[in-house]
Amino acid sequence: MMLTPAVPEKLPANQFDHFYQGGDRIGRLRNGPGGPMRPEEWIGSTTTRFGESETGLSTLADGTLLRDAILVDPVAWLGEEHVSEFGSSTEILVKLLDPDQRLPVHYHPDKTFAAEKLHINHGKTEAWIILEAPPGAKVGLGFRRAMSKSEVAALVAAHDSQGLLDSLVFIGVQAGDAVFVPAGVPHAIESGIFILELQEPTDLSILLEWNDFAVNGEKDGHLNLGFDSALDALRLSPLNAEENRQVFTQFDTGSSLSHSIFHSVADPFFRADYLPGEGEKIGAGFGIFICLSGSGSLDFELFGQLSVSMGDAVLIPHCAGDFSVDNCAGILSRPPMV
């Protein structure tokens, strides 16, 4: 395999069909193909769709798969300390989500369950950064009361979508909110909420309902484990008061200083910072910067200047060194700190 140099570069669009309907905001922001069944973009992805060999993987400007480029020279891309701790895994998957219909009630397994039942190294803890939301928009997160496995199994078997929705706690969200979603916690997202999502680098979802969606949940809703086994990954108890304080945050797009978007509960999984574009120095490290406003530049200590404007998604290798963001604002997504 030829060596693809690790340099900062703008990523091309990376959308493909899913089982739920999407709007046109990803296409407008990222100049992607869009389409009614393309509600997601996977950005800087070294992750494939569950059960597939290449769908989902991001390519570099020269056509090389990012996954393959990192395998050739992981230290340049990720840094020596990261490679010592995590190997060649980037540890993150960044997405844009633009659902034009409510997402079904579903959940994701944690790392322990994934290792025991699926023989992979990551679960799917995730977080949502709300970029836009219609008035009154809500997300569902966690059960209202303690449920039993048999209760949930009965709702699934009966295809009782309303019963499942009624079982969740729904919370209003608006632009600037962020929601950390621990693996195992059932959740749903209402239509029209535009989200930047960070997650562990897997495609592991277990569906509790699938009415009105283009998927056969009986066949494809349980990671090929069967629902009796898959339901063992579901958290049946509600989030407690302290957990609710930890999972909900807000970030300030009016601030002139960079700041973390999540509480420390997210640190073992991923990091995200809002960068206002005031020239503040950011330490070297692998990351993905999505420009949300303005037209300016990323200035790298060991690479030089890269012009960016709204909608650009910039892949940043560790070897580019320290950098600053000037005259444009956005969100920097990074793996856990080591």
Image (cartoon, grey):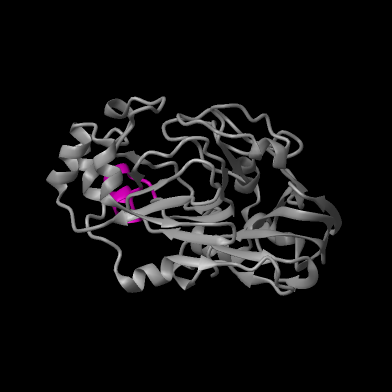
Q: Residue at x 52, y 38 (%)?
A: 99
Where is residue 68, by image quadrant? top right
Q: Residue at x 69, y 61 (%)?
A: 318
Q: Position of residue 236 (x, y in %)?
A: 22, 55
Q: Nearer the viewer, residue 189 or 182?
A: 189
Give the residue furthest to the front: 135
Q: Residue at x 34, y 74 (%)?
A: 242
Q: Nearer the viewer, residue 59 or 32?
A: 32
Q: Position of residue 187 (x, y in %)?
A: 36, 49
Quarter of the image with the N terminus in it: top right
Q: Is residue 149 visible?
A: yes
Residue 14 vs 149, above or below: the answer is: above
Please state if 219 lies on the left or on the right of 39 as rendered.
left
The stretch drawn in magenta includes residue 117: yes
Q: How many marks?
A: 0
Please state if 238 lies on the left or on the right of 59 as rendered.
left
Where is residue 145, by image quadrant? bottom left
The stretch drawn in magenta includes residue 78: no
Quarter of the image with the C terminus in it: bottom right
Residue range (magenta) = 108-122
Q: Position of residue 293 (x, y in %)?
A: 76, 55
Q: Position of residue 257 (x, y in %)?
A: 71, 74
Please state if 220 lies on the left or on the right of 190 as rendered.
left
Residue 311 vs 217, above or below: the answer is: below
Q: Is residue 122 visible?
A: no
